[in-house]
DNA sequence: CTCCAGGTTCCGG
DNA sequence: CCGGAACATGGA
């Protein structure tokens, strides 16, 4: 973030808050890969530090590192981290449920240990609203700008980390201020969604009790939220592990690997195929296919 | 310079 | 209902 956009009037910096403790705890893990989980394009604010990562889980500062089958995390964030990184997921059961084909097997070997995060709902929704037609690195840049300018900042022994600004905070901003965070046309969507939540027209937490179809329909009433982003929030926020977001990469995977003989297939056919073929943990399958295709820049799909 | 990125919305057939 | 275009920004 360079000077040009914040020259005119310097905003008041949020007051740093001292981290509560420097104690760390060790958590044994199996089938967990911290780096792949953090860098697989689900969350966008973790910063590599000291061989691990620093960031916030909601409003809880967290620094975490992995060595083999042991994860070390600051004690104050241990419970949050267990939940956020979904250390309770039964990976053997999930892997057993994957379809047995060459593309899926390759994606599994490549992405093994990646967890589907349980992210706080608003920061997940907001981050994906800003993700439309952006590369992962750009989404991360936007997240960091919004967090550091408008979120609560905490000084930790691993550096400063910031929480995502709450809906009522975003709702006090102008579209121009959001555009100055490089949001482009997404500024209007983020502002409108923040206003809807701050004004009580939608209650993200209350939706946890509803069926996935109901949640999806409610989310899609928000500006800038269509089927893809709604499915990302279902998967990465609400923990609906069968939700299957179809983005440009996954569409590429589906067409090349599973629809090679049906180039005329439309979006509905792709959606219906995905909903059944990949099983009850289709969201996991989707994330593994996405990560594999993206990091090999599509070469994983060549014949 | 051109192309594309974890899409959504609006418009004309 | 369907395909196409507009929408901002920045890295490859």
Image: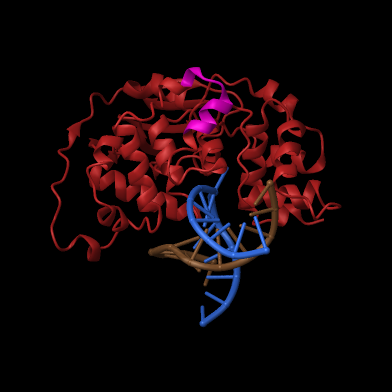
Chain colours: A red, B blue, C brown
Height in image: A237 above or below A50? above
The image quadrant where one finds the C terminus of chain A is bottom right
The furthest residue to the right: A261
Q: Is residue A39 magenta?
A: no
Percent x, y of residue A288: 65, 39
**Relative to the observer, which residue lies in front, A124 or B7?**
B7
**Relative to the observer, which residue lies in front, A8 or A86?**
A8
Query: Residue at 49% across / 17% down in the picture?
Result: A209
- What secondary structure do most residues of the magenta stretch adopt? helix
Residue range in magenta is A208-218
**Relative to the observer, which residue lies in front, A65 or A233?**
A233
Query: Residue at 30% across / 29% down in the picture?
Result: A59
Left or right of A284? Residue A214 is left
Percent x, y of residue A190: 37, 46
Height in image: A291 above or below A79? below
Left or right of A146? Residue A219 is right
Left or right of A291? Residue A12 is left
Query: Residue at 24% across / 51% down in the picture?
Result: A174
Left or right of A121? Residue A93 is right
The image quadrant where one finds the N terminus of chain A is bottom left
Quadrant of the rendered structure where residue A274 is? top right
Q: Is residue A59 visible?
A: yes
Q: Is residue A214 magenta?
A: yes
Quadrant of the rendered structure where residue A231 is? top right
């Amino acid at each position: 973030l360079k000077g040009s956009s914040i020259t005119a009037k310097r905003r008041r910096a949020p007051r740093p808050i001292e981290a509560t403790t420097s104690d760390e705890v060790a958590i044994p893990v199996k089938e967990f890969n911290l780096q792949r989980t953090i860098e697989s394009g689900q969350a966008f604010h973790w910063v590599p530090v000291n061989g691990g990562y620093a960031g916030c889980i909601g409003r809880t500062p967290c620094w975490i590192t992995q060595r083999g089958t042991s994860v070390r995390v600051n004690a104050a964030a241990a419970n949050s981290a267990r939940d956020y990184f979904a250390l309770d997921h039964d990976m053997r059961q999930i892997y057993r449920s994957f379809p047995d084909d060459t593309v899926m097997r390759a994606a599994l070997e490549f992405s093994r240990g990646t967890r589907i995060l349980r992210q706080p709902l608003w920061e997940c929704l907001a981050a994906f609203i800003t993700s439309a037609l952006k590369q992962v690195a750009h989404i991360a840049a936007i997240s960091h700008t919004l967090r550091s300018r408008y979120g609560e900042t905490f000084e930790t022994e691993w550096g400063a980390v910031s929480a995502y600004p709450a809906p009522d905070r975003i709702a006090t901003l102008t579209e121009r201020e959001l555009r100055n965070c490089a949001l482009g046309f997404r500024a209007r969507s983020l502002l409108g969604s923040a206003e809807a939540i701050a004004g009580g027209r939608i209650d993200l937490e209350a939706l946890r009790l509803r069926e996935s179809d109901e949640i999806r329909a409610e989310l899609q009433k928000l500006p800038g939220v269509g089927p893809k982003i709604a499915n990302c929030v279902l998967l990465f926020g609400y923990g609906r592990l069968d939700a299957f977001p179809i983005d440009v990469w996954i569409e590429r995977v589906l067409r090349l690997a599973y629809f090679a003989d049906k180039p005329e297939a439309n979006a509905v056919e792709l959606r219906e195929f995905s909903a059944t073929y990949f099983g009850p943990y289709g969201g996991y399958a989707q994330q593994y296919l996405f990560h594999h295709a993206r990091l090999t820049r599509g070469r994983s799909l060549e014949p």
